[in-house]
Image (cartoon, rainbow, N blue to C red):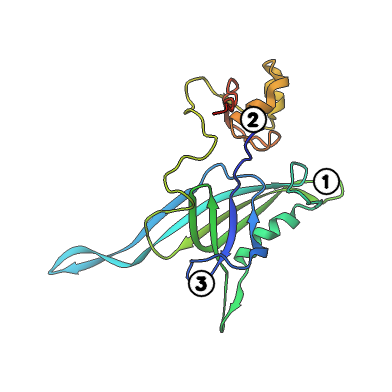
Amino acid sequence: MSEQLAKAKLQEVDAKFKNPIKPEHDTTVQFNPETLKVTFANQIASGEQRGTAGLQFVGAGTTKLTLQLWFDVTGEVPAGTTETDVRHLTEKVAYFITPIKQGTNFLPPAVRFTWGSFQFDGIMDSLDESLEFFSKEGIPLRASMTLSLSQQKIAKFSFAGAAGSAPAGMGAARGTRPLAAAPAGATLQGLAAAQGKGGDWQSIAAANNIENPRLLKPGQLIDMEARPEPQGGR
């Protein structure tokens, strides 16, 4: 039996970024992001110090997380989901940028993004949604969302679960064999079939951590020789 792939999750947390709240808004992504970009920025201003130009630190700095998520109702959807409009999936992410009343002010909820050992707490300050594919009736079926979370400080890294532990199921480092670049519009099934490996595409997908073999990005690198490591007993 293959191990279940860990999925990234968005949760609302309290105003002090301590504990998750409102579990009804917990959102597990359909497809994990390919990359997570973390940006650190200090506020530096020019100043005068005894007649010479100098630098002055202003404020506490900021940390920003940027990532992209994909949703597709034509692919594998969460259990119990019967949606035909992809916006019924993306609206769960849009909740985290929607201001809600907090005291006398309206503010977006504090949000926690976790994926494996990675954890980031902040406020969602931007969200872009692109509807990518439509049915013949004009219903959007696929969407990508680019979102950024910010926190008004620069702090040490936060780890979810056991800090520093390797994710379960990680095999040896890649790079020992040539990688195939996916052409635009290609599917993993098609690439495997072209190399005479059509009956083994599921193993190739598992070994390359490809969640949706019909949603390859142009130029995505794939090890067509990789196979999952056998799960041996003790």
Judging depth in this view, the residue of 48 and 71 nearest the camera is 71
Give the Cα separation between the discs numbered 2 and 3.
Answer: 40 Å
Circle 2 Cα neighbour tier, 10 Å, few/some/many (<14 / 14–19 / ≥20): many
Quarter holding residue 220: top right
In the displayed structure image, the side of residue 3 where residue 55 appears, left or right: left
Number of numbered discs present?
Answer: 3
* Quarter-of-image position of residue 5: top right
Furthest residue to the right?
Answer: 137
At 45% from the left and 48% from the top, the residue drawn is: 162
Residue linked to disc 1: 135
Q: Earlier in the sequence, mark 3 or mark 1?
A: 3
> Which SS class for mark 2?
helix
Labels 2 and 3 touching (C-beta < 8 A): no
- Under mark 2, the amino acid is Ala
Residue type at mark 1 is Ser
Task: Mark 2 and mark 1 in contact? Answer it, CB < 8 Å.
Answer: no
Q: Is residue 58 visible?
A: yes
Helix, strand or loop at disc 3?
Answer: loop
Front-lying residue, 2 or 51: 2
Q: Which residue is mark 3?
A: 15
Kindly report which numbered mark, 2 or 1, lies closer to the viewer in this rendering: 2
Looking at the rendered structure, the secondary structure element under dot 1 is: loop
- 3D distance between C-alphas at marks 3 and 1: 41 Å
From mark 2 to mark 1, how far is it between C-alphas?
A: 27 Å
Q: Say if 1 sits above or below 48 in the image.
A: above
**Label 2, on which residue?**
205
Identify the mark nearer the N-term, 2 or 1: 1
